[in-house]
Image (cartoon, rainbow, N blue to C red):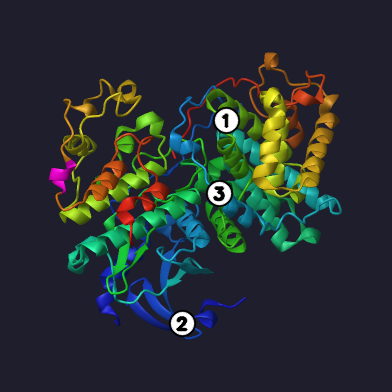
Amino acid sequence: MAYHHQKSLLDTLYCSEEHWIGEGEFDQAEEEYGNSNSNSSSTLVNNSPESSPHLLLESDMFWDEQELASLLEKEQHNPLSTCCLQSNPALEGARIEAVEWILKVNAHYSFSALTAVLAVNYFDRFLFSFRFQNDIKPWMTRLAAVACLSLAAKVDETHVPFLIDLQQVEESRYLFEAKTIKKMEILILSTLGWKMNPPTSLSFLDYFTRRLGLKDHLFWEFLTKSEGVLLSLIGDSRFMSYLPSVLATATMMQVLKSVEPSLEAEYKSQLFGILRIDKEKVNSCCKLMLELWSEFEGKQCMKRKFGIGWIPGSPNGVMDVSFSCDSSSNDSWVSSSPEPLSKKSRSEK
Amino acid sequence: MLTLREKYYDFDQISSKVFKCRRDDQFFTMKIVSILNEENQANNGVPYWIIREISILKELDHINIVRLIDVMTDGPDLFLVFEYLDNEFQADFLKNPKMFMYPQMKKEFLYQILNTVAYLHARKILLRDLRPENILVNVRTQVLKIALFGAARTFEAPLEAYSSSVGCLSYRSPEVLFQFGCEKYSTPNDVWAVGCIFGEMLLHRPLFSGPSDVELLDEIFTLLGTPTEETWPGVTSICGTCALMGPPQQPKDLAKEFPMLNPDGLDLLSKMLCLCPNYRISAEDAVKHPYFKGV
């Protein structure tokens, strides 16, 4: 065997896959499978002010220009910004169904908002890389949705349910074997070039909140509402044409109206100063948000007093929960999500 | 799309799962990882640490990080193609006797480690398992490379609760050992590990080596003193009655413990080994510290 003298170096560098992380590197496996509480949860996001300790480390609030530059550079390679589904109702329908399923399961397991956003991002990038519009079968999109959510949970969560449990949140026509999902995971990973940490709207929101210096209660309220808004829009394919930075800015502007109306103008000018972003695109995105909201304005609102115990799977249903119909003005059109019936503790990551 | 054998050739086995190979007169190191075998079936799909390590490495382009060039799949196997490091690169860099020949060399390598950690933190990546075994050095060219990102993960603020059982025990920060603030920890955890490596460079032995959390904390407090509300706000409310705190101890004089360090070096070491994560120096600020003047 050649290169014996290199063995010690390579054993360190490329440890065997049985101990991929290196023996003794973890006292216990960080990820736990199949231990997630399977009770239904009522929240789409689980870092609400009620469930999150009001503990912000200074390191949480750190920001630098390099981080923003890195995010902006990465989002320029966003393959979804040119996508349009309006011309393909079959594909759009398949996407709506997949996103609905992802959001429902995400809520059921109390996964974070980032997990849902990543799962949908993977799904969209995978879907559009294949362009199999003419031969779309429901089982294909469901299998892709299961694999995308599984991958997103592995990237962002610690406690990930078994693949079989991930599919049993609701009665389903399809139940895929673990090995089938695993093969689909590999296909998705290869297709996406293993780029599983794309810049998302949440990445920009995270940066903005630190950059604007939002503190404590305001910080939590802002993040929770922003996540709720983003998750309510995610099922509508029209928002795919906006870059994450644009969507994040539009979301932030709308949420600021609700959370801190007195500082809205000041924060707005700061935001545009930080990003030097195309105001037209942001305004167009805001307009679309308001249009979407008004589409549901006439529908019966799911109010806190009804004690809704789950987040409806459809984007429309999510919208009803995320947006309040009580407000007469569009200036404060974002409300808190309903109080969960049962709170689940956050998994360790 | 090119197959593995079409893209790479002249395979030369180095160990059971590692090969040296070529493409266009360039050498690479290829590592084979089986992900569809029966043993891994219980891992519930592709194991999370493989996804995290590869996806993080795919994003990085830094002279001090071992570069992942390509990932290919072939049946049940993944083929990871890394930059080729010749045999001048030595693993577990603190075990290399040449490391200690020149004091300036230690400073140079410490600077490279901190610079890399700052680069990662700016990209919202926590290393979480930085230790000498994961660092390779070429003493002749004085280039250092960090390898193994299996424990690394991306993060957003506000931090969620991450696993507190991550990383090699000797390099774990007090906040992780304490599980301070519901396992919320962040970039200061990596800076603590660099501080431990700095101390180890100077003493030629691990700075802390307790076999358990409690004994390790005792060693830390013996050197740096028991934290108080003044030195670590909030610590007593978390661990005031906790057995982990032990009897109160006064900090030792670092100048006596590290007589080889000049005042700038002592200042940097004390800032990296600050017990309170909020007061600990950031990697970005550490790189700009006067200790590195002239590096």
Nearer-the-camera pick, B121 or A327: B121
Q: Residue at x 75, y 61 (%)?
A: A132
Task: Classify mark 2: helix, strand or loop.
Answer: strand
The answer to whether A106 is drawn above or below residue A296 in the figure is below
Examine the rendered structure and indicate whether residue A308 appears above or below residue B30. above
> For the magenta stretch, what is the residue range?
B254-258
Say which of marks 1 and 2 sits in front.
Answer: 1
Left or right, A254 with respect to A40, comes to right
The mark found on residue A124 in the picture is none
Report x, y in % for residue B210: 18, 42
Verify CB contact (< 8 Å) between mark 3 and mark 1: no
Give the foreground label among 3 and 1.
Answer: 3
Looking at the rendered structure, which numbered label has been put on residue A214?
1
Question: How much space separates mark 1 and mark 2, taking CA atoms?
Answer: 50 Å
Earlier sequence position, callout 3 versus callout 1:
3
Label 3 sits on what residue type? Answer: Glu
The disc numbered 2 marks a residue on which chain? B
Q: Could you tell me residue A315's position as x and y percent?
A: 74, 36
The residue under label 2 is B26
Residue A333 falls in image quadrant: top right
Identified by mark 2, the residue type is Gln
Q: Which residue is mark 3?
A: A65
